[in-house]
Amino acid sequence: MRRSMFQSTNPALKHDEVWNTGIAASNENTASIQGVVNKTSMLAMIAAIGGMFGIWLVTNQPQLAMPLGILGFIASLVAYFVIIFKPMRAKYLAWVYALVQGAFLGTITYWLDNLLISMGYAAAGGLALQAFAITISVLISMLALYYFNILKPTKMFTTVICVLTLGIFVTYLISFIMALFGAQMPFLSLGSAFEGGQTAMIGLGLNLFILAVASLWLIIDFGMVEQHVKAGEPKQMEWFCGFILIVSLIWIYLEAVKLCFRLAIILGNRR
């Protein structure tokens, strides 16, 4: 459910035998750690290209943004569910998902940056740079926590994260429905940052909480990658592992952009 609502780059993993397995597997037709890293990096590059296309579209062909956005949403949703139920198809569809989601993130980031500028605020270096730095920091931090066995994807851990994610998904769905009728979800909407005071701080806290939940999915993802590599899965499974990681990273980046936007408003960073 979590992966259907948002949309993790370098996985790597905790035990020496995992790395040894990856090295041995590289000479065969089985998945390896290096292979997963390569596939994830490729998908990240495709997402970046999609982001640049999204920005170009809204600046040069704004009339096409809405219809292409709807088509892209449908395409990414179809690609997501096909991959989830048929992992071996990730090799052919993961790039579609990465491209569309990248375009979405690029558009959102560009729009929020311009909104800040129009209101006299500024995010040092731009929202994209700040959100990227947070995403990479989260990736490295989660990788360290996993590597040193501080956090492990146990059954209880996974269950708790899934329940929290389901709650977030339902909340976002309600917020989306409210937006269709011109209403806003209290605290959750970015507009709460402009209200200042306690409202803005609660909104910031919720943003941080959701970002934390998204980040913890990387622990589950790392465990999944390790499991597939240890099991000697077919090399095509590297695309599925890369896809799963990209899904998490995209969600983390999205929440990071929103967090940076809120902070620029709350801290009163004027141009």
Image (cartoon, grey):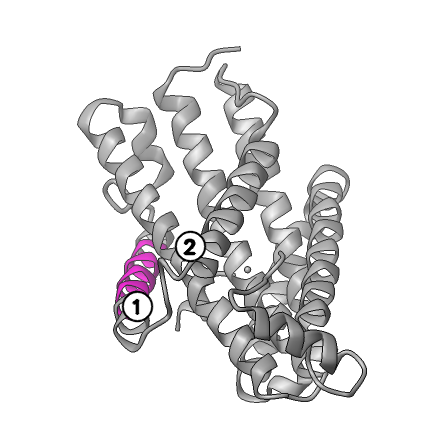
> Where is 126 relative to 19, above or below?
above
The residue where tag 1 is placed is 166
Label pair 1/2, CB-CB below 8 angstroms: no
Report the side of 209 relative to 62 (left or right). Answer: left
Q: CA distance from mark 1 to mark 2?
A: 24 Å
- Amino acid type of the residue that numbered disc 1 sits on in the rendered structure: Leu
> Where is 52 relative to 86, above or below?
above
| Label 2 secondary element | helix
Quadrant in which the N terminus appears? bottom left
Report the side of 271 relative to 216 (left or right). Answer: right
| Residue at x-position 63% and y-position 88% | 232
| Label 1 secondary element | helix
Q: Please tell me whether residue 233 belongs to the stretch shown in magenta.
A: no
Picture disc at residue 145: 2
User: Which of the two residues, 66 or 254, is positioned nearer the viewer here?
Assistant: 254
| Helix, strand or loop for the magenta stretch, by majority | helix
Q: Residues within 10 Å of mark 2 (few under 14, many from 20)?
A: some
| Residue at x-position 33% and y-position 59% | 177
Q: Quadrant of residue 184?
A: top left
| Residue at x-position 59% and y-position 74% | 18
